[in-house]
Amino acid sequence: MGWIGETVDSIKSLQIRQVLTQAVSLGMIVTSALIIWKALMCITGSESPVVVVLSGSMEPGFKRGDILFLHMSKDPIRAGEIVVFNVDGREIPIVHRVIKVHEREDTGEVDVLTKGDNNYGDDRLLYAHGQLWLQRHHIMGRAVGFLPYVGWVTIIMTEKPIIKYILIGALGLLVITSKD
């Protein structure tokens, strides 16, 4: 039995006070992560300051599994910038380059057309039915930096949920059985 037997014995020997202490510690870790996420949202002006590239549509610039850091400023969006946007009716944001900017003369608002660097055509087929341009409210942020390959952890846990449950279970067991 070895390690498993020791873990079971360790769980059996826990006092109520120890369990509560471990639960509070876990709660503090989760709360800290949420506070950091909210702070990043305020600093970057983006509803999602960090995203993972999920497809190969932006290769060779960004590969599947790269993590992008986003910032949303008040500056006008320009052709050539890489933006992350949401399309009405889709949950997953898309990372593509702005290829055309259209400024409305009557309101001064800017509409943009996007395309993946590795795609043949523009993104109008990805937009909502009848939509030809993206408006500012569709844009989540501009890519300002990236970490290559780090997002593969997220992709693997999404595509193979059993790995996510095993990892969460192992971390929970580690927190419960830790003696500190």
Image (spheres, rainbow, N blue to C red):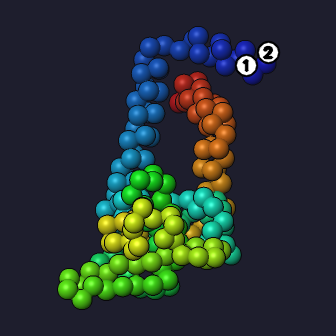
Left or right placement of residue 20 versus residue 105 in this view: right
Q: Which quarter of the rendered picture does the N terminus lie within?
A: top right
**As drawn, which residue projects farthest toward the left?**
106
**Residue 135: x, y in percent?**
34, 72
> Which amino acid type corresponds to the residue marked 1 in the rendered image?
Ile
**As drawn, which residue projects farthest toward the front?**
130
**Residue 171: x, y in percent?**
59, 33
Q: Which residue is mark 2?
A: 1
**As drawn, which residue projects farthest toward the right?**
1
* Mark 2 Cα shell of 10 Å, populated few (<14), some (14-19), many (≥20): few
Residue toward you, 172 or 24: 172
Label 1: element kind: helix
Can residue 34 be seen here? The reply is: yes
Write the residue at 67% across / 37% down. Answer: 163
Can residue 150 be seen here? The reply is: no
Write the residue at 31% across / 62% down. Answer: 42
Q: Is residue 5 above or below residue 36?
A: above
Q: Is residue 164 above or below residue 135?
A: above
Write the residue at 45% across / 77% down. Answer: 113
Write the residue at 41% across / 73% down. Answer: 132
Marks 1 and 2, Cα distance to the nearest angstrom? 6 Å
Q: Which residue is mark 1?
A: 4
Quadrant of res 151: bottom right
**Residue 2: x, y in percent?**
79, 18
Q: Are marks 1 and 2 in contact (CB under 8 Å)?
A: yes
Quadrant of res 129: bottom left
Left or right placement of residue 60 versus residue 38 in this view: right
Left or right placement of residue 76 versus residue 22 in this view: left
Q: Is residue 37 above or below residue 133?
A: above
Residue toward you, 75 or 148: 75
**As drawn, which residue projects farthest toward the bottom?**
105
